Image (spheres, rainbow, N blue to C red):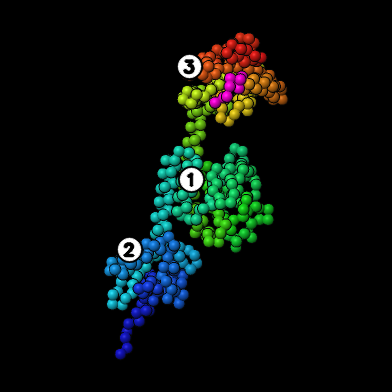
Amino acid sequence: MRSDHPPLTAVMDLLLDAVCVVDRDGRYLYVNAGFERIMGYRADEVIGAPMIERVHPDDRERTLQAAREIMAGEPKLHFQNRYVRKDGRVVDIQWSAHWSDEERVRIAVGHDITELKRAETMQAALLAISEAAHAEGDLQALFRRIHRIIGRLLPAANFFVALRDQEHGMVEFPYFVDEHDEAPAPLSLETPTLSNEVIRSGQALLLTPDTLAELHAHQEPVIGHAALDWLGVPLGTANGVIGALVVQSYHSETRYTSLDKQLLQFVSTQVASAIERKRNQAWLEHLVGHDALTGLPNRNRFHERLEQALETANRDSLRLGLLYLDLDGFKRINDRHGHDLGDQLLREAGERIRQCVRQTDMVARLGGDEFVVLLYGIAHPGHATAVAEAIRTALERPFLLEGQAAHISASIGVALHPEDGEEKKPLLRHADNAMYAAKREGGNRLAANGIQAG
């Protein structure tokens, strides 16, 4: 007798979801057309093959555990895992599955929730980036956290941030993680590199072996080892492009697609806002503790550092040196040449002083034409007087102001810890008195422990 109903297999093939039947050993016995649509494999490519081979490696153990529970009589209505499609893309599937004792098979219906999971992941990433902008203490901590967040969206073993220095036309690499290369030195924005192209154009760039021919002949793909796949997106803000986020791969197992480009672009604006926020915060903190004219630490920051240094020195029996400087003849030059050139002289004087000390030492401007130098952990008292003499000699050299040579000198008072005091007030008082003693003797000299030199 003829039936008016289509065969069951034809009905199954009309379903958009994947339907599969798996035997007790976990091998496919049947899959419908929806399986091919979602997984990319035809039925003849998987029948008889182990189901677990198609599961994402990171999800295999819990998938096998779920299969054991299903065969023990515990149906699964909302089990989620990831599969690797034939084309290599990963899909998220939500399964409803149960075990048939009569047929001795596991029957499952899988719904593709990839887009839903991606949307959830993206929203979680945006929230995490926003939280990081407020929580992390500095840019390096922020970059590390952003790296981890992006690593949840796409392969990011090789990841770097390129930031634009608008004032100097340079590009720096403050965060650079790569399996082959160290961070490049800062380079001009005009250098023909891929990251510079992204920053200049404001456009995302995805390069694979198939698209490398699109590079202009004058353009350098990367600095260092050549990547197999390269993906960069601009960091755009209301004030323009401030840099680029870049991921790259050296291995065929990790490839980037247009979908990865979309994902990275989606979070880039939030990342750019987080970076800009942190940079502005760092700049404001810098302004609070630094002199606006010379960029050196100011009076407040100096006193903070001096107290910290004295605490460490008293605990660890270290010697400190304190140099108090006043510029001789600055007022005369400031009155003659004007405040603009006077400011230029102060900036250059601060730089000359800074070049005479170690990176571990501190040079601060207290105000006007007064500077102070804090020398950490000096080996003997003579080290402080040697540095003071080097500074005196450096400031004695003429300054070129609008093509004219201007001459100043410095009166320098030297105090030592612990010889001249173990606390801040007596140490500062001794340095200040020594400086005025040098000034009374005509300037262009240093005074320390009653000894004057010029």
Amino acid type, residue under disc 2 in the picture: His
Amino acid type, residue under disc 3 in the picture: Lys
Q: Position of residue 189 (x, y in %)?
A: 62, 44
Quarter of the image with the N terminus is: bottom left
Above or below, 41 against 230 in this view is: below
Q: Residue furthest top?
A: 440
Number of callouts: 3
Please state the extent of the stretch shown in magenta in the rendering: 376-385
Q: Which residue is mark 1?
A: 144
Q: Position of residue 367 (x, y in %)?
A: 54, 20
Q: Which residue is mark 3?
A: 425
> Which element is circle 1 on?
helix
Q: CA distance from mark 2 to mark 1?
A: 35 Å
Q: Residue furthest bottom?
A: 1
Which mark is nearer the camera, 1 or 3? 3
Q: Position of residue 22 (x, y in %)?
A: 37, 73
Q: Earlier in the sequence, mark 1 or mark 3?
A: 1
- 216 to the left or right of 137: right
Q: How many residues crowd around disc 3 within 10 Å: few (fewer than 14), some, or many (20 or more)?
A: few
Whether residue 382 is in magenta: the answer is: yes
Residue drawn 33% across the image and 67% down it: 68
Q: Earlier in the sequence, mark 2 or mark 1?
A: 2
Q: CA distance from mark 1 to mark 3?
A: 42 Å
Q: Which residue is mark 2?
A: 78
Amino acid type, residue under disc 1 in the picture: Arg
Which mark is nearer the camera, 2 or 1? 1
Residue drawn 30% across the image and 74% down it: 100
Residue drawn 64% across the image and 20% down it: 389
